[in-house]
Amino acid sequence: MVTASRATQADRMTILKRFLVTLVCMIFFEVTGFIVQLSVLFQYGYLLIAKKRSEPLRVFTNTLSTYGYKLMRYNTLNDNKRPFPFNTFPEESDCEPPVKQIQFK
């Protein structure tokens, strides 16, 4: 599906300001990805040792993944709402709920 690109009505200074905000958001995205990776490793270590998942970590990483999604939507010009730190951090109610039971197949 091919879509036509649209010319913007914004001036170059406004575009430059958004680009600078995007650079900050890109740094936050990289840090977010690193924290998610550490959380995954910890969650599997905890799962192997305790044979159950850490629910607080699961909720935190669900919120963090929603935040990463919002960062990417803003960075790729698919959303106009600035993410955290320029706006509020996503809450648990903003996230898609996690599955009840994890399957290992």
Image: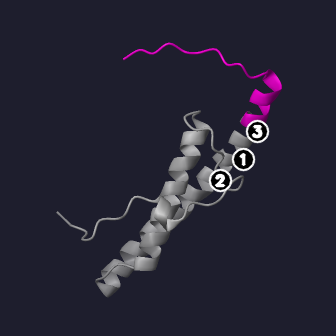
Secondary element at tag 3: helix
Vertical order, 27 against 15 (above or below)? below
The answer to whether 76 is drawn above or below residue 55 in the figure is above
Q: Say what secondary structure mark 2 lies in.
A: helix
Q: Is residue 37 visible?
A: no
Give the residue type that dot 3 points to: Leu
Residue name at image x 52 percent, y 61 percent: 64
Image quadrant assignment for residue 100: bottom left
**Residue at the right extreme of this rendering:** 13
> Which residue is labeled 2 in the image?
28
Vertical order, 46 against 70 (above or below) = below
Q: Is residue 92 left or right of residue 17?
A: left
Which residue is under mark 1?
A: 24
Give the SS element for disc 1: helix
Query: Residue 42 in magenta?
Result: no
Neighbour tally class for label 3: few under 14, some 14-19, many 20 plus, Cα within 10 Å: few
Picture coordinates of residue 96 (x, y %)?
A: 40, 58
Whether residue 14 is in magenta: the answer is: yes
Q: Amino acid at mark 2?
A: Phe
Task: Give the dominant element type of the magenta stretch: helix, strand or loop.
Answer: loop
Give how far apart the Cα atoms at labels 3 and 2 are: 13 Å
Marks 1 and 3, how far apart in space? 7 Å
Q: Which quadrant of the rendered structure holds the C terminus?
A: bottom left
Q: Residue 91 location in percent, x, y?
A: 54, 65
Picture residue at 50% right of the left edge, 13% below the top: 4
Magenta highlight range: 1-18
Determine which of the numbered discs, if any, sits on residue 20 in the image: 3
41 relative position to 49: left or right = right
Quadrant hosting residue 16: top right
Whole-percent x, y for residue 33 in the image: 54, 56
Please give the count of numbered marks on the rendered protein: 3
